Amino acid sequence: MAEAYFPVGPGLGTEENFLSLDDILMSQEKLPGRAESALPRLAVLLGQSAGSAESIPEGSKLEIPLWLAKGLHDSKRRIISVELPKIYKEAWRTVFSADANVVDLHKMGPYYYGFGSQLLNFENPENPEIAQTDSVCSLQTFIARFRRIMDSSQNAYNEDTSALVARLDQLERALFQVGQKGLNDFQCWEKGQASQITASSLVQNYGKRKITDVDG
Amino acid sequence: SEAKAGRTDLIFLIRFRHCCLLRNQRCLLAYLYDRLLRIRALRWEYGSVLPNAIQFHMSAEEVEWFNRYKKSLATYMRSVGGEEGLDLTQDIKPPKSLYIEVRCLKDHGEFEVDDGTTILLKKNSQHFLPRWKCEQLIRQGVLEHVLN
């Protein structure tokens, strides 16, 4: 309780929150794409070659971060076109429908759900169905995993939860933490500690880190 | 100047550079905004005077922001709850008693109680003090609230 720091949370759906640190980290994740026209002088920036001032030929494959893909993308696809990363494609969808609880979503890109929602921004006229089935699949995966997350967060009191949390992506981890906090608050109330005034955690953190003075 | 000469293939480069600039701007703004949110939280969790160690790391603009926020909050608190105003930063958890048992976590020197007597706050000493006087010191980590 008595926590007064409320950071900006991630955005919902296809819109990111501009000031959200979570969304900034999420949009740093890379997407596979394809150059639609020759891109002069970009070779050095995108790490394609050790030379200088070379242009990337048309049609070559690129891995670019989401923020760049969103900025360079337009419906006529003059500069780049993007494709779905493989974890959002058919092959993985069958894995998810088999048993969603087994998949290590943290390894699949720690922002599986957030990133997936952002992919809906890129309209792909060849496969208009993909966006639809994509979101449905994400949703079903989430529903399948949610039960276990909720159960474990409400029943793991004062334990090391790293094993439980290791395979969850960021959204699921946030949910897990909310559940844990609720559990801890309740236990604290049951023990009669709810009325105890505590030092704020901000203060405790500042105390632990030695803030060294800079000379001159 | 190459763009002015009509080379359309460089439009892409301009767009790319613009994306990068926007990205940098976004990262900077989010960082500064997060700092402000933490500074604001400090007013509520720590009190109206920040320790030197923290103030040292704040920019002049942030210090000014903190002062203005303090002032706004004080004005608001004074306008609420009748003549004396209402200190919203007190009693964040519902109080159970007027006096509480506290233990001192670090040496804090002398402390004056309402009836004029002073108490020496030495590490590990325990005292029975009015709640409203200790609340801030507990939040700052100087005292510890002891339950029976």
Image (tube, rainbow, N blue to C red):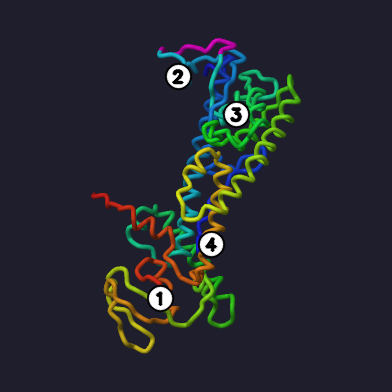
- Compare residues B122 and B26 and report the one nearer the observer: B122
Separation of marks 3 and 1 at Cα, in angstroms = 54 Å
Residue with the most extreme right position: A129
Q: Which residue is mark 2?
A: A47
Query: Residue placed at 58% from the left, 11% from the top?
Result: A58
- Look at label 3 and name its amino acid: Gly
Query: Residue placed at 60% from the left, 37% from the top?
Result: A101
Please state the extent of the stretch shown in magenta in the rendering.
Answer: A51-60
- Compare residues A54 and A22 and report the one nearer the observer: A22
Q: Which residue is mark 4?
A: A185
Q: Is residue A18 left or right of residue B116?
A: right
Tell me if mark 2 has few (under 14), some (14-19) or many (20+) residues whose alpha carbon lies within 10 angstroms of its own.
few
- Whether residue A33 is situated above or below residue B87 in the rendered picture: above
Residue A196 place in picture, x, y as percent: 46, 71
Q: Chain of mark 3?
A: A
Name the mark nearer the viewer: 3 or 4.
Answer: 4
Q: Quadrant of residue B13?
A: top right
Query: Residue placed at 42% from the left, 71% from the top?
Result: B136
Tell me if mark 4 has few (under 14), some (14-19) or many (20+) residues whose alpha carbon lies within 10 angstroms of its own.
some
Q: Which mark is residue A71?
A: 3
- Look at label 2 and name its amino acid: Gly
Q: Is residue A196 left or right of residue B77?
A: left
Q: Chain of mark 2?
A: A
Q: Is residue A122 left or right of residue B75?
A: right
Q: Which numbered disc flags the more N-terminal residue, 2 or 3?
A: 2
Q: Which numbered disc flags the more N-terminal residue, 3 or 4?
A: 3
- Look at label 4 and name its amino acid: Asp
Separation of marks 2 and 4 at Cα, in angstroms = 49 Å
Name the mark nearer the viewer: 2 or 3.
Answer: 2
Q: The C terminus of chain B appears in which quarter of the rendering?
A: bottom left
